[in-house]
Image (cartoon, helix red, strand yellow):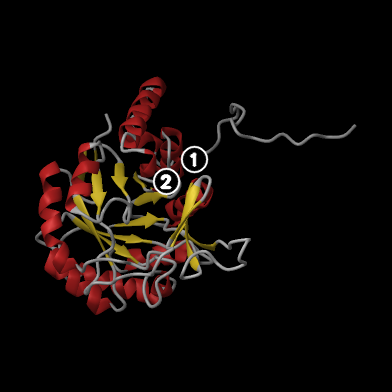
């Protein structure tokens, strides 16, 4: 009931581990896959090892996180052995890759094409100077990077978009023109936290990326706008922690969803969400593909009262 094929990759369910969450080792990727993820995305990999920012690099909030890890990674070359370990779980593996220039993305994609099932281009990290959102906010660069990678591999190429722009659809269209097979929306929102006792920013980098439940409405809006503008599939990510969140994202236009911060509650999250979606579809007597983009259809004349609506009190 939940099996899908997206950009030529077959998934047993539409739930994907998001980049940067338990994707640092092959063993952790394998563990997530065996817990029920339909596919896994590695942490973002670059040409050379990066130490990232010094601690503190993560602030835990009541219902989310602000992180500024700084694209810490061992380099794609040193990660190849981890991919072999992750392969033991028999689920698709998508490599998240980053670079400062199109040539860097192309070099990594060329080298890794025989080892993974697809690529997710990190053009959206909000806290790494010279990478991520700094280049992913420019439609011309997004198109150029995407085209460069597509010319280097026959594998599916997903482009992860930043929400920290005025018009995300413009960036999505640039990725589509460059040949992207899908877009992933969204990465974290640029944010910060200050210690009230010392008066100083908590993160060593001062600024980081906000993730978790607070960004879900932003992600839903972004997916909705992209669905209206693009012809290629959208993978929704940002604040999904329940089957209702996943269904909402799909109704906005996502063909699949990625789970990130919610994984910290436990790996049972994948089974909980997939089981919840299955029950929902059975109750509604619908197929999974029938709910994708349903929020864009014309409203029926009689609609049930929205579950979370706030009625305005009118004074007499």
* Neighbourhood count class around disc 1 (C-alpha, 10 Å): few under 14, some 14–19, many 20 upward: some
Outermost residue toward the top? 283
- The disc, 1 or 2, on the residue closer to the chain's N-terminal end is 2
Say what secondary structure mark 2 lies in: loop
Snapshot quadrant of residue 80: bottom left
**In the rendered image, the vertical position of residue 300 relative to residue 119, given as above or below:** above
Q: Return the x and y of residue 17 as percentages of the image width and height.
A: 30, 47
Instruction: State whether residue 6 appears in this view.
Output: no
Closer-to-camera residue (298/223) = 223
Marks 1 & 2, CB-CB < 8 Å contact: yes
In the rendered view, does 250 fall on the left or right side of 78?
right
| Residue highlighted by disc 1 | 295
Q: Return the x and y of residue 224 as percentages of the image width and height.
A: 48, 50
Q: Quadrant of the N terminus?
A: top left
Closer-to-camera residue (171/177) = 171
Q: Return the x and y of residue 150 as percentages of the image width and height.
A: 22, 67
Instruction: State whether residue 262 appears in this view.
Output: yes
Snapshot quadrant of residue 300: top right
* Neighbourhood count class around disc 2 (C-alpha, 10 Å): few under 14, some 14–19, many 20 upward: many
Residue placed at 11% from the left, 58% from the top? 81
**In the rendered image, the vertical position of residue 278 relative to residue 218, given as above or below:** above
Residue 44: mark in rendering:
none
Q: Return the x and y of residue 257 as percentages of the image width and height.
A: 35, 45
In the rendered view, does 181 fall on the left or right side of 195?
left
Residue placed at 15% from the left, 49% from the top? 86
| Residue highlighted by disc 2 | 253
Distance, label 1 to label 2, CA atoms, is 8 Å
Q: Quadrant of the C terminus?
A: top right
């Amino acid at each position: 009931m939940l099996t899908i094929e997206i950009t030529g990759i077959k998934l047993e369910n539409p739930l994907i581990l998001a980049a940067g969450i338990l994707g640092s080792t092959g063993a952790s990727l394998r563990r997530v896959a065996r817990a029920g993820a339909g596919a896994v995305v590695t942490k973002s990999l670059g040409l050379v090892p990066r130490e990232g920012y010094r601690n503190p690099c993560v602030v835990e909030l009541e219902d989310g996180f602000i992180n500024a890890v700084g694209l810490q990674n061992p380099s794609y070359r040193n990660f190849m052995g981890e991919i072999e370990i992750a392969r033991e779980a028999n689920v698709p593996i998508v490599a998240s890759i980053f670079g400062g220039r199109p040539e860097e993305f192309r070099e990594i994609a060329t080298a890794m094409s025989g080892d993974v099932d697809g690529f997710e281009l990190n053009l959206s990290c909000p806290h790494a100077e010279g990478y991520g959102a700094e280049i992913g906010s420019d439609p011309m660069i997004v198109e150029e990077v995407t085209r460069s990678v597509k010319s280097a591999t026959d594998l599916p190429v997903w482009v992860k978009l930043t929400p920290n722009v005025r018009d995300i659809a413009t960036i999505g269209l640039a990725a589509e023109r460059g040949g992207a097979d899908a877009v992933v929306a969204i990465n974290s929102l640029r944010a910060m936290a200050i210690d009230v006792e010392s008066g100083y920013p908590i993160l060593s980098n001062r600024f980081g990326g906000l993730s978790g439940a607070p960004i879900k409405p932003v992600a839903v809006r972004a997916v909705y706008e992209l669905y209206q503008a693009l012809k290629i599939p959208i993978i929704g990510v940002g604040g999904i922690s329940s089957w209702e969140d996943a269904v909402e994202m799909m109704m906005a236009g996502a063909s699949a969803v990625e789970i990130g911060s919610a994984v910290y509650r436990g790996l049972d999250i994948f089974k909980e969400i997939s089981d919840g979606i299955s029950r929902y579809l059975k109750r509604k007597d619908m197929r999974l593909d029938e709910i994708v983009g349903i929020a864009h259809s014309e409203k029926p004349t009689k609609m049930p009262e929205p579950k979370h609506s706030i009625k305005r009190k009118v004074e007499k």
